[in-house]
Amino acid sequence: MADAGLRQWIEAGEYDHLALRIIPLVVLYAFAGFRFERAAQPWMARPLYLGAAVLLVVACDLLALNGRLFHTLGI
């Protein structure tokens, strides 16, 4: 994300761009957790689920900072 303009987003206060780049990580962590859970390795799935949940909350909070959460969700 540093190459995609992370510094400019933070300096300009465009946190919605950062949040939209975090959301694919949420999906990736949740999918990896699901795969580990299906492989009978819950000790690895739990931290991935927790990481996905924390990143989802962070992404929603970053979207809400600019007031763009409802716009992005289409509400």
Image: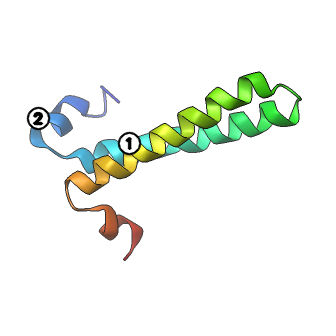
Q: Quadrant of the N terminus?
A: top left
Residue under the point 43% across and 40% down: 22
Q: Which residue does the image show at 72% across and 30% down from the upper left?
A: 45
Comparing 46 with 10, the one in front is 46
Q: How many marks?
A: 2
Q: Amino acid at mark 1?
A: Val
> What mark, if any, has residue 49 been given in the picture?
none
Q: Residue at x 76, y 22 (%)?
A: 43
First reached walking from the N terminus: tag 1 or tag 2: 2
Q: Quadrant of the image for the C terminus?
A: bottom left
**Tag 2: amino acid:** Glu
Left or right of 63 on screen, residue 22: right
Question: Does residue 23 sit above or below 69 in this rendering?
Answer: above
- Residue 2 vs residue 59, the one in the foreground: 59
Q: Where residue 69 appears, x then y in whole percent?
A: 32, 62
What residue is disc 1 on? 58
Under circle 2, the secondary element is helix
* Residue that numbered label 2 is attached to: 11
Judged from this view, the residue extending furthest toward the left is 12
Location of residue 51 in the rendering, given as x and y in whole percent from the top left corner: 54, 32
Residue 34 shown left or right of residue 23 in the figure: right
* CB contact under 8 Å: marks 1 and 2: no
Cα–Cα span, label 1 and label 2:
18 Å
In this rendering, the label closer to the viewer, 1 or 2: 1
Q: Residue at x 68, y 30 (%)?
A: 46
SS under mark 1: helix
The x and y percentages for residue 60 are: 37, 52
Viewed as shown, does residue 59 lie left or right of 33? left
In the displayed structure, 39 sits above or below 19; it is above
Q: Residues within 10 Å of mark 2 (few under 14, many from 20)?
A: few
Please identify the quarter of the rendering in which residue 67 is found: bottom left
What is the x, y in percent for residue 8? 16, 35
